[in-house]
């Protein structure tokens, strides 16, 4: 086994786990953004561990269980190297996709994730989406039972509003909140950060590259045809040109700093504070190496401000999701 490389570490919350400053989001390994290959995905995860990445982020709805099985297989001989995060709450039914935060389902979902991951305990267990029909206190109460039973170590929430976070935290300490956060889409994340910092909660930034937009390789909406991004407003024709013009600005700033656009925007996120941990996803070894190169990009306070002003808050066109009704509750 290759000895993992040393990497900058950050703590998720006052009492949460210590993790690599950059984690790996595993969703794209289940065919969400174009075709994926299981063997290549296992190789990618193990390569990430070799590079010192310790935080792996999955969910039971990524491939509807397939992603957890994949991650479980990849880490089978290396469990001690991993802080493993997974999520529950998004469900399929005859009416389509929904949310379930009922206490009995929390227990059921956890047991299923443990089986698929082939582990005894989940390091960080998130509620993926807040259920509007169940009091958050009830859901988190059931999650807290899992901690007491030794099946989960730390609790998290995803896409939760500040008032929801406060109510949840009053039931059991929330270690981490996960929200989409990038140079393009940051209004709700920055609002959330005010609350997480007050309460001593860590912040995990998902989609830190704007679902690939900020990496600079997407120049036409047709490039995302056939994957989930084609359904997202930011990639659709009426919004694409505006967002592409913002990426042009990012590319110019990256040239000034002598790095790639992806490295610039990840470095900008890392510079937001030691409580912020981005989890970019990828299917390719070379792209993982590029992302990790962001840790070597040094931004002064003036650089951070300059980048922020170049892509002003709210400058991006189009909502984050096709239907925002179920997001950020």
Image: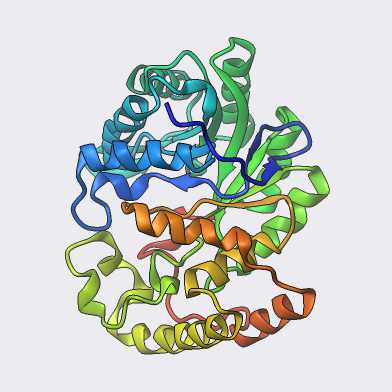
Name the foreground residue: 73 vs 109: 73
Regarding residue 99, the answer to whether it shows in the image is: no
Task: Residue 306 in the image: state x and y as whole percent.
Answer: 69, 84
Colour style of the rendered protein structure: rainbow
Name the foreground residue: 19 vs 292: 292
Residue found 63% across the figure and 21% down from its top: 144
Residue found 78% across the figure and 51% down from its top: 197
Residue extending farthest to the top is 149
Residue 170 to residue 30: above or below:
above
Residue found 73% across the figure and 39% down from its top: 13
Regarding residue 1, the answer to whether it shows in the image is: yes
Task: Residue 61 in the image: state x and y as whole percent.
Answer: 34, 39
- Is residue 289 left or right of 202 when viewed as pictured? left
Task: Residue 146 in the image: state x and y as whole percent.
Answer: 57, 17
- Is residue 66 left or right of 56 when viewed as pictured? left
Residue 317 to residue 161: above or below:
below
Residue extending farthest to the front is 2
- Is residue 36 left or right of 326 when viewed as pictured? left
Residue 182 to residue 125: above or below:
below
Quadrant of the frame with the N terminus: top left
Name the foreground residue: 62 vs 142: 62
Task: Residue 189 in the image: state x and y as whole percent.
Answer: 62, 61
Hey, which quadrant is residue 265 in on the image? bottom right
Residue extending farthest to the right is 198
Hey, which quadrant is residue 188 in on the image? bottom right
Residue 74 to residue 200: above or below:
above
Name the foreground residue: 20 vs 269: 20
Q: How many marks?
A: 0
Residue found 61% across the figure and 31% down from its top: 155
């Amino acid at each position: 086994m290759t000895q993992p490389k040393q990497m900058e570490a950050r703590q998720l919350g006052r009492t949460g786990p210590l993790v690599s400053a950059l984690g790996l989001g595993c969703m794209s390994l289940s065919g969400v953004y174009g075709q994926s290959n299981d063997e290549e995905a296992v190789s990618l995860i193990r390569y990430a561990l070799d590079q010192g990445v310790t935080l792996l982020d999955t969910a039971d709805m990524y491939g509807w269980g397939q992603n957890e099985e994949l991650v479980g297989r990849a880490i089978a001989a290396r469990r001690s190297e991993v802080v493993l995060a997974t999520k529950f709450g998004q469900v399929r039914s005859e009416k389509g996709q929904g949310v379930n935060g009922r206490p009995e389902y929390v227990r059921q979902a956890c047991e299923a994730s443990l089986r698929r991951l082939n582990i005894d305990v989940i390091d960080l267990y998130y509620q993926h989406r807040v259920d509007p029909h169940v009091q958050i206190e009830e859901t988190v109460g059931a999650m807290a039972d899992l901690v007491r039973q030794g099946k989960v170590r730390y609790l998290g929430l995803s896409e939760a509003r500040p008032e929801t976070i406060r109510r949840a935290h009053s039931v059991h300490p929330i270690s981490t909140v996960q929200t989409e956060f990038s140079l393009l889409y940051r209004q709700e994340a920055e609002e959330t950060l005010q609350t997480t910092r007050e309460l001593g909660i860590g912040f995990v930034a998902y989609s830190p590259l704007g679902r690939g937009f900020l990496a600079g390789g997407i120049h036409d909406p047709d490039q995302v045809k056939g994957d989930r991004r084609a359904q997202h407003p930011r990639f659709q024709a009426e919004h694409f040109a505006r967002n592409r013009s913002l990426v042009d600005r990012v590319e110019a700033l990256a040239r000034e700093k002598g790095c790639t656009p992806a490295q610039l925007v990840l470095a900008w996120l890392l510079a937001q504070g030691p409580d912020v941990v981005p989890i970019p996803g990828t299917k390719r070894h070379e792209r993982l190496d590029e992302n990790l190169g962001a840790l070597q990009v040094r931004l002064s306070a003036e650089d951070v401000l300059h980048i922020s002003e170049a892509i002003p808050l709210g400058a991006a066109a189009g909502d984050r999701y096709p239907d925002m009704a179920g997001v950020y509750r």
